[in-house]
């Protein structure tokens, strides 16, 4: 039978019996004293309203004086985990473009009922989704015969890690409606403070920079958009950050120091990093 308040106890006085000056009461008093202490709320560093960086490390001097004039409209569908990352590239991208030209939508699952605007964009014949695969067309080939400014495209970019982006693409039927495109340019990521799966994988900002330069027929756009990213990485490296080589680079050079996965699918994925140059989602 369970002990309940008021039950007789065989404990001798002075230990756990009713006359003991109860240890539990002491604990309650102690926690009460702690609860009465004033809570110190850590002050958040003032943040720049344009680049969204702390004011002491503001990157606005590296942004264009005026937002870039583009006809293309970007829709960045962002995995929720990206919001908590300190070194993000999407705020820098948005700061370089006019209001309404870089729309960020956060979530994992998207449907017509909860996201009617995004659904309408996905159904628009001018919309492209940037995601590589066997069904993807090279973006440069697609626009090769279009007159400059004749089509005002929408471009959907998935913002997340490789596995997050893949999961979001496969599990959202809306993302299968637009024409699927990929970048055919051979580029090395400038985002060296974050590990990429392979040498050809690019950050969201870099993908947007290349796509916009192709669609707008203006290579200067790429240069302007990459300037704040290079400044961010340079600052971080000067203050203790380390260069992050891609997993492909580490595996190829025998530098990968983490335990190899036991799951066969994961092992095959690791092998593809060395043999397949078309697996990067963004």
Image (spheres, helix red, strand yellow):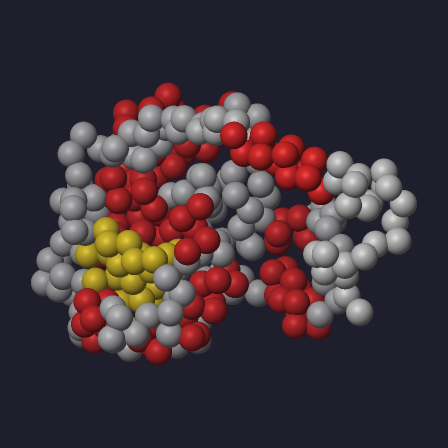
The answer to whether residue 159 is above or below residue 257 is below
Number of on-image labels: 0
Name the quarter where the N terminus is drawn. bottom right
Which one is in front, 166 or 276?
Answer: 166
Q: Is residue 275 visible?
A: no
Which one is in front, 145 or 80?
Answer: 80
From the viewer's perspective, is 26 left or right of 50?
A: right
Q: Position of residue 239 (x, y in %)?
A: 53, 23
Name the quarter where the C terminus is drawn. bottom left
Q: Position of residue 260 (x, y in %)?
A: 74, 59
Residue at 90% across, 45% down: 12
Q: Is residue 247 visible?
A: yes
Residue at 23% across, 51% down: 102
Residue at 35% across, 32% down: 53
Instruction: Report the residue that reaches farthest toward the left.
Output: 150
Which one is in front, 136 or 85?
Answer: 85
From the viewer's perspective, is 48 left or right of 160?
A: left
Q: Position of residue 6 (x, y in %)?
A: 72, 56
């Amino acid at each position: 039978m369970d002990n309940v308040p008021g039950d007789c106890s065989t404990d001798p006085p002075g230990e756990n019996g009713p006359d003991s000056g109860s240890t539990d009461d002491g604990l309650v008093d102690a926690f009460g004293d702690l609860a009465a202490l004033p809570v110190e709320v850590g002050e958040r560093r003032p943040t720049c309203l344009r680049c969204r960086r702390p004011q002491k490390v503001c990157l606005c001097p590296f942004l264009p004086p005026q937002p870039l004039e583009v006809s293309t409209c970007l829709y960045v569908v962002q995995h929720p985990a990206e919001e908590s990352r300190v070194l993000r590239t999407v705020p820098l991208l948005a700061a370089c473009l006019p209001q309404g030209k870089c729309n960020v939508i956060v979530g994992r699952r998207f449907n017509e009922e909860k996201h009617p605007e995004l659904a309408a964009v996905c159904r628009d014949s001018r919309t492209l989704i940037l995601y590589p695969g066997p069904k993807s067309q090279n973006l440069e080939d697609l626009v090769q015969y279009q007159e400059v400014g004749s089509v005002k495209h929408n471009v959907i970019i998935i913002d997340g890690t490789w596995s997050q982006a893949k999961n979001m693409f496969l599990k959202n039927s809306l993302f299968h409606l637009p024409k699927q495109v990929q970048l055919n340019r051979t580029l090395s990521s400038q985002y060296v403070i974050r590990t990429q799966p392979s040498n050809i994988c690019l950050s969201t900002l870099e993908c947007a920079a290349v796509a916009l330069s192709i669609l707008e027929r203006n290579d200067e756009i790429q240069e302007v958009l990459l300037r704040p990213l290079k400044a961010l990485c340079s600052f971080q490296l000067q203050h203790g950050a380390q260069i992050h080589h891609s997993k492909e680079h580490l595996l190829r050079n025998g530098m990968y120091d983490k335990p190899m996965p036991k799951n066969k699918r994961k092992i095959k994925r690791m092998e593809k990093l060395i043999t397949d140059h078309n697996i990067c989602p963004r």
